[in-house]
Amino acid sequence: MRAPHLYHSLRCFCLGAFRTLLAELAEGADLPFAFEEHGSYGRPALYEYKPLVRPFVEVRAHRLKQREDARIALDELQREPAASIFARAHAGARPSEDDALFMSILLPLLVRTAETCGGFDWDDAAYDKAYADIEDSLFGRGHAYGAVAPLVGITLGGQAVELGGGIRVRPAATGELAKLWPEAGGLLPPDFGREPDRLCVLELERALAHGETDPPDAVAELADAVTAIRLATAAPAAAGPVLFERLDWRPFGIRPVLPIAATSPVGEPTRLDSFRGGLAADLLARLGAADEDPDLGEALDRWELSLFQDGPFRAEQLRESLVALLGGTDGLWAAVVRGAILLGENGKERADAQARLSGDPDADLIRRALVETLLRGERSTLVRMLDETILGLRPAPAARPPSLARALAS
């Protein structure tokens, strides 16, 4: 035992909560049960009544938090540096540190103890086992952080697609969200889990070093991943509307996804295959360049905003995106010519690209121009190379690899 003071104060909280909950049962409150069948080959099935202590406790969580023993336990946790990351849990609108500590440490400890006891008949061994898990989490070598958001608008071939940095797209497991977050059912997109393009999740997993007190900014990182998927596939991909965070495989919080990433564009669902998955991973790794290049960031923002508009408003956003990407101070005409050189492999293709970029720009060509620019490195260097090609001082930039050409043309 590494923290006897925590062991004692948290044990007192659990004992007091057990007494309160037993008193409610004695007064007529109902503890729900699940009727589970355990079958085995060649033997009769066995049946078990399993008390559903988690919903029973969670309904009474607010009242349990008001008790004096809960106040003492929270004060002890507030003074413990190892618990500081749990105090930053995002559970509800503007949670206090007390709320975060209660929801991420005290309540799970109480539920785990009660589940091991099979109800509210106290067992020291059950508490010791649940507390040992809390200590391992608090004082271990680090933490295992995860964030999961429902993903719609794309399909998978059954295999997870790694996007790098601990981010992946994978099939959703049945009941995985409801297991840790019982309220998840009301926070999922319509028909999630029932339609072919609503069977995936976007997941971030990361190991946190011991003493690290701030979790990753999963909201921003998963929004970038959605942008990379949209660029690579032209799919109407969207994540959310919320993401579910866990720490050491216990609920850590629920946070809203950025609106631009959580809103579904118009379009037909697309498969995220190995080509497009690899392209999305490359793009995600390079989206950080927009932080150092305001014009590139403007081009990406304008293009993504155009996904939710139509008519002249959409055309204007696409034009502004192209100008920010390749025009600079030279304006739209230069952006159109440079874009034609960038996207066309020969004179015929360049003439066609120039026609499609002029006037009412082709949205897919703008997308492809953004992809090409991100993959080719520094944008200002690319613009200079394109100008030299126009003047006949150098050949056009190297042709795209066949795999990239297939992914972009699909």
Image (cartoon, grey):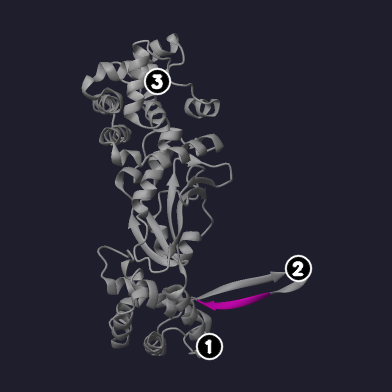
Q: Position of residue 285 (x, y in %)?
A: 42, 42
Q: Position of residue 31 (x, y in %)?
A: 45, 80
- x, y (%) of residue 322? 30, 25
Q: Start and end of the magenta stretch?
A: 46-51
Q: Quadrant of residue 360?
A: top left
Residue 310 magenta-drawn? no
> What amino acid does circle 1 point to?
Ala
Indicate the amino acid at tag 3: Leu
Magenta segment, prevailing SS (helix, strand or loop) = strand
Residue 77 visible within the image: yes
Residue lying at 40% horizontally and 13% vertically, measured from the top left: 350
Amino acid identity at mark 2 = Tyr
**How much space separates mark 1 and mark 2, taking CA atoms?**
33 Å
Position of residue 391 relative to residue 264, above or below, is: above
The residue where tag 1 is placed is: 125
Instruction: Give the mark nearer the N terminus: 3 vs 2.
Output: 2
In the picture, the disc for residue 342 is 3
Q: What is the number of the mark on residue 41?
A: 2
Visible residue check, residue 118: no
Q: Is residue 49 magenta?
A: yes
From the image, state whether disc 1 or disc 2 is nearer to you: 1
Contact, CB < 8 Å: mark 1 with mark 2? Answer: no
Residue in the image at 25% along x and 19% along y = 332
- The residue drawn where x is 43% and y is 15% is 395
